[in-house]
Amino acid sequence: MWRYLAPLGLFMVLVVFLSMGLSLDPKDVPSPLIGKNAPAFTLPDLHSPEKQISPDLYKGQVWLLNVWASWCVSCRAEHPVLNQLAQKYQLNIVGLNYKDQRNDGISWLRQRGNPYISNAFDLAGRVGIDWGVYGVPETFIIDKQGKIRYKHTGPVGWLDVEEKIMPMIQRLMKEAP
């Protein structure tokens, strides 16, 4: 009798763990970088390769880093929100064009609008790896001291803007540098 109950008990334990795993949100991947200094990088600008972009350019400001690519379907869905966010709130949004071809990224922005104050070109994807990017799109909020305060995985929607992103940005803007 016990030899039948042991496998059944093991099976029941596995079912419980599987059901717990299925209830988790796959977009809710915690970042080990929250509260830490944003990883340093120096990359060429997407539009002007002779110009260099670095997080140091934005010290003393609250800014967003949005990781995107022209081949990314979810980026297409979030892009109108970023355009409106930049226009409505005058936010500093820096793009990180991830594993993309330069001409494809430029054409994509020309067609869909450009919400970015600058756009770093990360053809090899090394900077994305340093920032812990799992896939595109991903958006980070960086505070005035250059620390990552929030990471949003997946496309940003207006509900995310209203409930998480703007309240945090408004709070961070009030803090002293």
Image: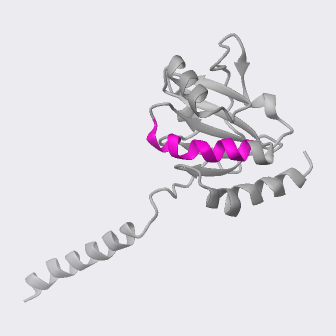
- The reply to whether residue 6 is in sight is yes
Question: In this view, which residue lies farthest toward the front?
Answer: 111
Answer above or below: position of 120 versus 156: above
Q: Is residue 29 left or right of residue 22?
A: right
Whether residue 31 is visible to the viewer of this picture, yes or no, is no
The residue that appears at 75% across and 42% down in the rendered structure is 87
Tell me the quadrant of the picture where the C terminus can be found.
top right
Q: Which residues, given as a range, are shown in magenta? A: 72-86
- Viewer-side residue, 51 vs 15: 51
Where is residue 56? Give x, y as percent.
Answer: 78, 29
| Image quadrant assignment for residue 53 | top right
Quadrant for the N terminus in the image:
bottom left
Please determine whether, in this image, residue 35 is positioned above or below residue 116: below
The quadrant where residue 45 appears: top right
Instruction: Give yes or no for residue 19 being in the magenta stretch.
Output: no
Residue positioned 48% across, 44% down in the render: 74
Q: Percent x, y for residue 48?
A: 68, 14
